Amino acid sequence: MKAVDTANSDAVKVPRIRLWRKPLDYVRTQLQEREDQVFLVLALVIGALTGLVVVAFIVLTERLGMRLYPVGGARWRRLLFPVAGSLGIGYLLSRYFPYARGSGVPQTKAALYAREGRITFRTVFGKFFCTSATLASGIPLGREGPSVQVGSGLASVLGRNLGLGPERVKALIPVGAAAAIAAAFNTPLAAVVFALEEIVGDLHAPVIGSVVLASATSWGVLRLLLGNSPLFKVPQYQLVHPVEFAIYAVLGVLGGLVSVAFTRLLLGMRERFLRLPLKTQWFQPAAGGLLVGVLGWFTPQVLGVGYGFVGHALNGSMALKLMLLLVFLKLITVTVSYASGNAGGIFGPALFIGAMLGGSVGTVAHQLFPGHTASSGAYALVGMGTAFAGIVRAPMTSVLMIFEMTQDYAVIVPLMISNLVSLFISSRLQPEPIYDALAIQDGIHLPGHESRQRTAQHRVIRIMRPAGNLLSAETTVKDALAAMNSPRNWLVADARGVIGVITRNDLEQAAQDGADKPVADLVNPIHFPHLHSDQGLDLALDRMGENKLEMLPVVNRANIHKLEGIVHLQDVLQAYGIHPIP
């Protein structure tokens, strides 16, 4: 009888567990069977959630910042809070949220192309909290880039928890990105173009319907909660005389040069910070906070994103000397703050710098040609788009964004002229876009348009083979020569993974200068010949020829030091039907 009771007891317990799990399993099964229908509904949900999060972002950063360092407040506040905020958040980023540093746009693109669309909820929470605290403490970075990662992260978390396939989850990334930009800038159309132009890299991507739906939903949430107020209130634009087109072209030249200076300064300083010992990473952001605090002691306008001062420039109520000073100070504080590891983006700073530059050009032009030029506010407006196009390299997004902010079609032609000139100059002087360069510094190599469109039959993944022995980076040139019996290539590796490729010729030349130095001195751990598994065999041949190598490492896009295999010249030739002569 006792055994019977036990069996009955077990029989009672099992159904309880199944009844608790059965609805979830059923829902997940239905979602997997109807992914097409669910995808559009999910776009609505993502748009609404992202809109709520961005609204919280805006309210939290602006209101908290006004309390910490109010206009006309004590100077010690402007020095203390940036330093304390960057130091505390630096520890949290290093200890708990390592993937929440920086802008968020390169990390979002890495999730799309190198991490199967995976962004964890921990990263989403860390990005929101750390960026909010960083910006509220006065660090002059933007909230729009972090919003992109948060929106895409919410999309990734929802998609994976609902059991969607990897390709569907990846397709949700631009959906979340568009929703974030629509709410952050109050520009739903520009948000759609940005998600397709910058995140996906294809304006004809098949996810355009879901992207539009999420953008409109997020924008609706923003309007419902914060009202029908544009991000900037600007006067009506007027073209006074055709000679202004030449002045807008000059603004484009200056905007392109400033964009190049911004990009090179940021990348150069960030490279220096990345070379510092890993144990210093948690307090590196304090370098940016200290610089901001010291300069904010004398010039409070450098604190925070500064959209309020942008509004003054757009309405022509800022002095020329102050605008010129802010162009220089913001250029320094933003690049140091970002390079040192603070959480925040470069969208807002690009608009700020562009507005001050445009306002300066407009003020000078109006003083020289008062009867032939508009007020300085018109030039500040065009300057915003000019700097954005030169730094972010998203010209279509820039034009549509400024158009939606002003709702004035007359600004389009001057904006297109200035943007085109700025984009041309910045592309010539700094060929690599800033987001791609930042990703490379982090060891992430994002695919170009050709790699994404290439057919699978001639890709590296089809012929790569497992790697053999690796040469330790600590090995001396003398010992490496003794171990290398033939003039073949060797992969060099350290604790991070593969860091380069060397040949016997490299070793023999290095031995003339000193045979006792390590082989690590012969390679560049950031820029070394390599391939990715999704790249084409024609590219493999090109790189082998350029570097005079018969073998190349195949590395992971999300981590350049993670070795996935190797490709030999012989295997590439055989893939094209060319066999060695016996």
Image: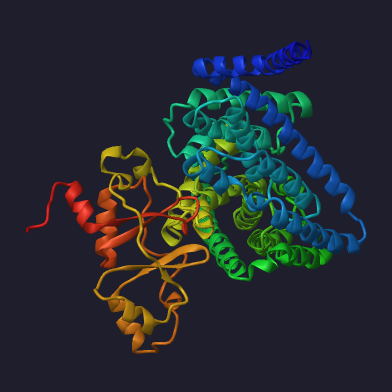
Q: How many marks?
A: 0
**Can residue 317 be seen?**
no
Question: In terms of image quadrants, where is residue 262?
Answer: bottom right
Q: Position of residue 557 (x, y in %)?
A: 45, 50
Considering every residue shown, the one lying at the far right of the view is: 74
Q: Position of residue 116 (x, y in %)?
A: 50, 39
Placement of 254 over or under 538, stated as above or below: below
Considering every residue shown, the one lying at the far front of the view is: 1
* Left or right: 480, with 279 as reference point: left
Q: Quadrant of the N terminus?
A: top right
Task: Name the foreground residue: 170 vs 13.
Answer: 13
Q: Position of residue 372 (x, y in %)?
A: 57, 48
Task: Name the foreground residue: 116 vs 463.
Answer: 463
**Can residue 573 be seen?**
yes
* Left or right: 3, with 384 as reference point: right
* Left or right: 304, with 557 as reference point: right
Q: Quadrant of the C terminus?
A: bottom left
* Left or right: 52, with 237 as reference point: right
The residue lying at 44 percent from left, 84 percent from top is 517
Placement of 104 over or under 210, stated as above or below: below
Placement of 337 over or under 20, stated as above or below: below
The residue lying at 41 percent from left, 72 percent from top is 523
Task: Name the foreground residue: 183 vs 25.
Answer: 25
Task: Name the foreground residue: 237 vs 187.
Answer: 187
The residue lying at 30 percent from left, 68 percent from top is 489
The residue lying at 84 percent from left, 64 percent from top is 79
Check the image and tell me how it is coloured: rainbow
Q: Position of residue 446 (x, y in %)?
A: 45, 49
